[in-house]
Image (cartoon, grey):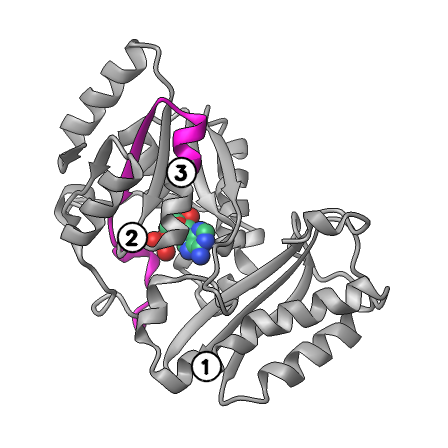
Amino acid sequence: MNIISTIDKMQKKSSQIRSDNKIIAFVPTMGFLHEGHLSLIKKAKEVGDIVVVSIFVNPTQFGPNEDLDKYPHNFERDRELCQDAGADFIFYPEVNEIYPETYFTYVEVHNITHALCGLSRPEHFKGVTTIVTKLFNIVKPHKAIFGQKDFQQSQVIKRMVSDLNMDIEIIRSPIIREADGIAMSSRNKYLSESERKDALVLSKSLLLAKDFIKIGKLDSIYIKDKMIKLISSVPSQIDYVEIVDADTLKEVEQVKNNTLFALAVKIGKTRLIDNLYIENLNKEETWQ
Ligand code: AMP
């Protein structure tokens, strides 16, 4: 496995790989890797010949009062994990390499970026689409793997790729959870022992939603109310609990095919997100 930290070297390497007719599968990350990230690398190995993982804590996707400065990192550990997972390259640039002083260009998706996380993080997706576009131009992947954990992000990227006619296949990979149900996240590290226990209400509220769907209770207002009650049973601050169409991200009155349950909740100072995607209402195996 090779570590590349300049744009020029990465672009040259990617061009060479492409000219050898090899498929480049790309996994963008902000590092501090866990099993969730490793599942994306595994998927990348299945769908591509050469796997590139990027590790870059992208400043433009953090708001002014967010956790950019304390975002956890441990490159040595990440390097080992990538190596063990079978990645071929890590692209690990400095901030100046990506955003020199004279940087003035942003890529923006409208509409679906104003819902859910976009409401409390108004600049977030602009930062995401900008860095992902830049990384796509640097790594030149045929395929890119994104986690369902950030469902809205994957929809925004798919929209951008389609709207801007980027020739890249976007693959969404399922959420990896700890044994007790909490979705794996680099930010779980911020939780104290008691907050870690309280944080279980996120995944539990999604299980509760599943139980209602199973018995045919499909009314969104009813399910949302029960979810909110469960989450509010622990010290928490709800950013949103929404039941939306997975493409438009607009609220639905009844759960139907292609419905997304999405939530963002602050436990202590840590903002956590989780979701449940109902692809086909009649096939429980598609609820994930
Ligand atoms: P991050 O490093 O948090 O920016 O995440 C990098 C990628 O890993 C994104 O596509 C995330 O959606 C994905 N990811 C993060 N956590 C998980 C998880 N628990 N399961 C699956 N994918 C995840």
Q: CA distance from mark 3 to mark 1?
A: 29 Å
Residue at 41%, 42% in the rendered image: 40
Location of mark 1 (residue): 197
Report which residue position mark 2 lands on.
30
Indicate the quadrant containing the N terminus: top left, top right, bottom left or bottom right: top left
Q: Are marks 2 and 1 in contact (CB under 8 Å)?
A: no
Q: Is residue 62 magenta?
A: yes
Q: Mark 2 or mark 3: which comes first in sequence?
A: 2
Image spot of residue 96 (x, y percent):
13, 47
Residue 214, percent from left and from top: 80, 62
Q: Residues within 10 Å of mark 1 (few under 14, many from 20)?
A: some
Mark 3: give few (<14), some (14-19) or many (20+) Cα within 10 Å.
Answer: some
Residue sitting at x 36%, y 22%: 49
Q: Position of residue 13 (x, y in %)?
A: 20, 21
Ligand 1 closer than 8 Å to label 2 CB: yes
Quadrant of residue 59 within the rendered picture: bottom left
Mark 1 element type? helix
| Residue 136 sits inside the magenta stretch | no
Magenta residues span 43-66
Of 250 and 38, nearer the camera is: 38
Residue at mark 2 to residue at mark 1: CA–CA distance: 25 Å
- State whether residue 125 appears in this view: no
107 or 285, nearer to the observer: 285
